[in-house]
Amino acid sequence: MASFQLGARTPRTYMNCRAKRCARVRFSCGRAARAATGRAGLREHSVFGRTVGMVSIDARRYRGRSTSLERMSVLLRSIHTLLTGGAGYIGSHMVRALVGAGHAVVVVDDLSSGHRDALPPGVRLVEANVADREVMVAVLREHGVETLLHFASRIEVGESVVDPRKHYRGNLAASIALLESALDAGVRNVVMSSTAAVYGNPQYSPIDENHPTLPVNPYGETKLAIERMLASYSRAYGIRYAALRYFNAAGGDRESGLGERHHPESHLVPIVLQAACGVRPDVTIYGTDYDTPDGTCIRDYVHVLDLCEAHLAAMEYLDQGGEGGAFNLGTGSGHSVREVLDVAARVTGRPIPVRVGPRRPGDPPRLLASSERAMRVLGWRPRRGALDTIVSDAWAVCRERNSPA
């Protein structure tokens, strides 16, 4: 069952940001919303000082029911930003950042890896696969979406090697269908969740956007293919895009209790903290003989809330007519596996059992980002780059979620 939540206050004011100006837009939707919520027997909710009601709508009802949805379009016209994968790790943090910044938001997520409870009350959720063209075109049109944030993706590098069709189908084929829907619905701007995996093994460090893109796994290959498709669509159809190449996203949001919840978990920071909580017995260090100061791999960790601010900056840049393209997101400072373990032990005050395993194929000694282009063009700066901050925020969430009662 998918759900839309309709504003129940009338009239309501929404700050609608446009290129180099802000126009105050007023619309009246309370009577119809109250009638709809009354028929559905659902309560109103208050979110960030706004009163909203919720109407549950099965995504299947989009198919062949455009006439009935047109009657609702006046209620939904305030929505301008759609997130795919908005119930996932980074997407759910982004939803809260957008709502906090005054944006009206709708989320499309099939909940195959996302979590319904990661969304705040009052946020619209359509439970559907982004590859479903009929549903996506209807949702995009009826919500008047102008900006699409594309987070939905398979992210497991190892899985992409042993079962590549999942990534080509779930990442590339789904994105082809999604962008077709976006074009048909008149979406103007796309911000894509991309990855440093598009570069493959680094030829120099730190890596900038001019580094050769030679991915070494299907995960990176599919992301690069989507980036190239966006570039082609931009030239041919005028759609503006930003491909944000994350390095190592980490951290969490203490206020909301959001953090990483992957199944299975494959990211170092949450794995280390799960060992501190006793959720897992130990942490494996894959290789201690790399050409680094302590022999373990070095990575560039960027706080998830800094990533959200980068997305907001990219949205504003595209809305102002920016040229777009690819942007690295990292801090430029690297930390080794042993450094992460040491910081985690200090932050948690708990011992973290460790065992040493062999190197994993394809793990480069160092992966560091040059984010100079994002800083110069988007005006973005990572404000939470200290490893202690990243681990402390992640620990606050992990301890609440995983500590024994």
Image (cartoon, grey):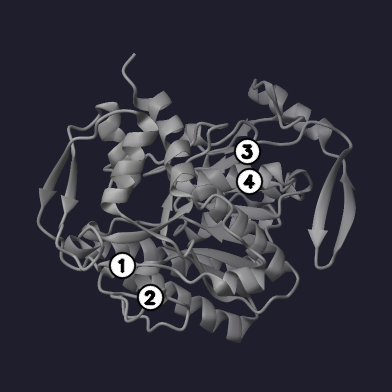
Quadrant position of residue 343: top left
Residue 216 at what x, y percent from top left? 25, 74
Give the amino acid at mark 3: Val
The residue at which mark 3 appears reads as 123
**Residue indicated by mark 2:** 205
Instruction: Please say if 165 is above or below 115.
Output: below
Left or right: where does residue 401 sit relative to residue 26? left
Please rate how many residues cluster around mark 3, counting C-alpha atoms within 10 Å: few if below 14, some from 14 to 19, many from 20: many
SS at circle 1: strand
The residue under label 1 is: 366
Q: Which mark is residue 97?
A: 4
**Residue 51 vertical placement versus 139 (above, below):** above
Which of the image's four quarters has the C terminus? Answer: top left
Q: Judging from the image, what secondary structure is the residue with disc 4 in?
A: helix
Instruction: Identify the residue at the far left of this view.
Output: 358
Q: Is residue 203 left or right of residue 31?
A: left
Q: Are marks 4 and 3 in contact (CB under 8 Å)?
A: no
